[in-house]
């Protein structure tokens, strides 16, 4: 009508509601047409996994510059650690040895300024913006992070380490000892070590390098002390002190190595000062060197702990087999299994490692390792996502040697197999040695056994490992324990199992039947001649009559049990008892 105005917003909302209702009607129509392939639950897709993993594991607060595992922060710590090591190594060297002169002071000062700039940037820019844990929560607020850093001991040491004591050079002259406070920034050095080990694949290599660096630094300090003692006594004044010949640092470092490692063969100290210095050096050398050797042993032992466990398990197994006189053929197969399992996955049992982690991390690893394989199984498409998660955590990995039977013909199937690595061959034929098909990585077989009624179905062929094969196994009991909590997925799987069983039970198509040609096609196919007429026409004289009587006698024998059964049922007696009595009488 005239003068009527349409609300555009309300009209747009109504159109959107109509569109959604049409889409929902279309979805329900598809479900009614094909209920097997449709499920009201969400499907298991990589998109949903990636979104969920991004939400859970890639948490990056916007208010903070560095999270707890940011590699950029580790790189910055490495730069500060380089500046810290410069101060730790060269401040004692420049204080004791006459390497800093008026001609090269500008270069030393320039490098010192660069190191001080790194210290100041770390103090003012980076450290106040690092996240921290408080009561299990990751604090990413700028004010809270700055307050936490300013209240820590690390902040106090960082402030002391950047105090410019070099201004005292105006009164006392330039001396590297005024920069000794730079060595108080040791917390950053140890923090860098911890964070670097957390992100390295082979952290034990860095631990060996770091321990070796500790030893070299202690020898460096000892060399500086020896030159200082020689200068205090007078260079070349006695046989024990440094005589001033050759490269002063290398000569002193050589003396420090022989003394600290207690090799011996050095000149005897002459004065009381030299004797006390030498005794303290020997005592310190024994303590420090033994500590470093013990630490090196622990680092190497931790790096080879897995290899030692593998050797121990293999030796114990071999000892057990020798005790009970196991045949050599079996022993060789056991050794081969140990060697291949260790070489392929670096451990004997992956579940032992995963059990130490929380369920969330186990799920993350299982998705990355097993999702691509499980996603190929048509049986689980459309199932509940969480049900697939639970199933991924319950898969078991088993290694089969070349020639091992994965399953044999006639066995009751209670497991499903997923080929993770390697190949298996399906054998058949009259003698069971003909290769019907070869299954490779990613293939699945035995999935019908998981959902077959009556406790499982029998295997119809032999499956043998062709070479080394690593298979995932999911048994019927495990799947039933999972499906208890997911009834909708259980119904969907049962429907799919019925469809697969019907497809599997269809007879193989035989050769095409030839249709009669000409006038024979008008009368149809000829019926088979009865056996009675075949007997009469097949023999002549007494032979044909004898065969006719034999057929009649067989027919009478087949009719007698039926008549007897009818008499027994009419008399009201028990069929089983009478037939049992007849059997005993016969």
Image (cartoon, helix red, strand yellow):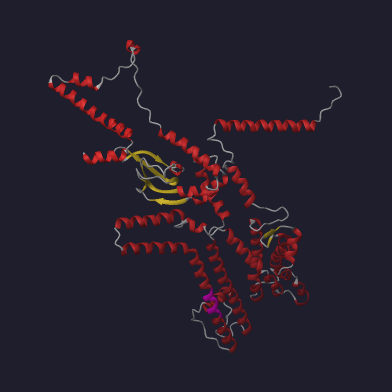
Residue 149 placement: quadrant: bottom right
500 or 133: nearer the viewer: 500
* Quadrant the N terminus occupies: top right
Between residue 218 and residue 46, name the one nearer to us.
46
Residue 243: give x, y in percent of width and height.
57, 80
**Residue extent of the magenta highlight:** 284-291
287 part of magenta stretch: yes
Q: Is residue 474 visible?
A: no
Q: Quadrant of residue 385?
A: top right
Percent coordinates x, y for residue 485 in the rendering? 55, 48
Check the image and report above or below for 403 versus 428.
below
Task: Specify the quadrant that holds the C terminus.
Answer: top left
Picture coordinates of residue 305, whole percent (x, y) = 47, 64
- Residue lying farthest to the front in this orientation: 571
Q: What residue is shown at x 19% (from left), y 23% (from top)?
A: 548
The residue at the point 13 percent across, 19 percent down is 541
User: Given the current orientation, which residue lies at the most extreme left position?
Assistant: 542
Prevalent SS, magenta region: helix
Residue 253 lies left or right of residue 332; in this view the side is right
Q: Taking the image as drawn, is residue 3 in sight?
A: yes
Occupied quadrant, residue 26 = top right
């Amino acid at each position: 009508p005239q003068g009527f105005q349409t609300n555009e917003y309300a009209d747009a909302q109504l159109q959107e509601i109509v569109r959604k209702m049409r889409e929902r009607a279309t979805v329900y129509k598809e479900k009614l047409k094909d209920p097997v392939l449709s499920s009201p639950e969400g499907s298991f897709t990589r998109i949903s996994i990636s979104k969920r993993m991004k939400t859970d594991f890639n948490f990056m607060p916007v208010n903070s510059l560095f999270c707890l595992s940011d590699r950029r922060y580790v790189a910055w710590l490495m730069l500060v650690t380089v500046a810290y090591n410069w101060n730790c190594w060269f401040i004692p060297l420049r204080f004791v040895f006459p390497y800093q002169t008026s001609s090269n002071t500008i270069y030393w000062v320039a490098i010192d300024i660069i190191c001080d700039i790194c210290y100041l940037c770390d103090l003012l820019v980076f450290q106040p913006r690092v996240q921290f844990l408080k009561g299990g929560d990751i604090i990413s607020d700028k004010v809270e992070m700055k307050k936490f850093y300013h209240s820590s001991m690390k902040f106090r040491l960082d402030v002391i380490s950047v105090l410019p004591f070099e201004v005292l050079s105006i009164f006392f002259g330039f001396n590297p000892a005024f920069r000794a406070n730079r060595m108080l920034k040791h917390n950053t050095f140890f923090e860098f070590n911890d964070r670097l080990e957390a992100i390295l694949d082979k952290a034990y290599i860095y631990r060996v390098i770091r321990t070796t660096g500790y030893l070299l630094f202690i020898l460096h300090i000892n060399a500086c002390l020896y030159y200082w003692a020689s200068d205090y006594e007078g260079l070349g004044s006695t046989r024990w002190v440094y005589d001033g010949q050759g490269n002063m640092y290398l000569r002193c470092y050589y003396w420090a190595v022989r003394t600290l490692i207690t090799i011996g063969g050095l000149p005897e100290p002459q004065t009381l000062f030299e004797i006390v210095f030498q005794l303290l050096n020997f005592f310190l050398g024994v303590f420090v060197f033994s500590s470093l050797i013990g630490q090196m042993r622990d680092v190497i032992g931790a790096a080879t702990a897995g290899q030692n466990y593998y050797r121990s398990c293999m030796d114990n197994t071999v000892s057990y087999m020798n005790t009970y006189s196991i045949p050599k053929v079996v022993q060789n197969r056991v050794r081969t299994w140990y060697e291949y399992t260790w070489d392929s996955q670096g451990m004997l049992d992956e579940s032992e490692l995963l059990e130490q982690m929380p369920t969330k991390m186990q799920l993350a690893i299982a998705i990355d390792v097993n999702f691509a394989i499980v996603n190929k199984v048509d049986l689980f498409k459309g199932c509940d996502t969480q049900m697939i998660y639970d199933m991924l955590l319950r898969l078991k990995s088993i290694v089969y040697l070349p020639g091992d039977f994965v399953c044999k013909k006639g066995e009751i199937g209670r497991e499903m197999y997923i080929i993770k690595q390697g190949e298996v061959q399906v054998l058949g034929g009259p003698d069971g040695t003909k290769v019907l098909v070869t299954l490779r990585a990613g293939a699945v077989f035995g999935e019908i056994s998981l959902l077959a009624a009556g406790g499982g179905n029998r295997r119809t062929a032999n499956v043998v490992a062709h070479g080394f094969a690593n298979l995932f196994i999911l048994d019927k009991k495990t799947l039933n324990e999972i499906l208890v909590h997911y009834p909708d997925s259980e119904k969907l799987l049962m429907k799919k199992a019925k469809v697969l069983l019907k497809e599997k039970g269809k007879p193989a198509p035989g050769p095409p039947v030839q249709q009669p040609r000409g006038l024979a096609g008008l009368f149809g196919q000829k019926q088979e001649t009865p056996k009675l007429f075949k007997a009469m026409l097949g023999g002549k004289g007494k032979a044909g009559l004898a065969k006719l009587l034999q057929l009649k006698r067989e027919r009478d024998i087949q009719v007698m049990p039926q008549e007897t059964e009818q008499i027994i049922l009419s008399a009201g007696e028990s069929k089983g008892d009478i037939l049992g009595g007849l059997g005993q009488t016969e």
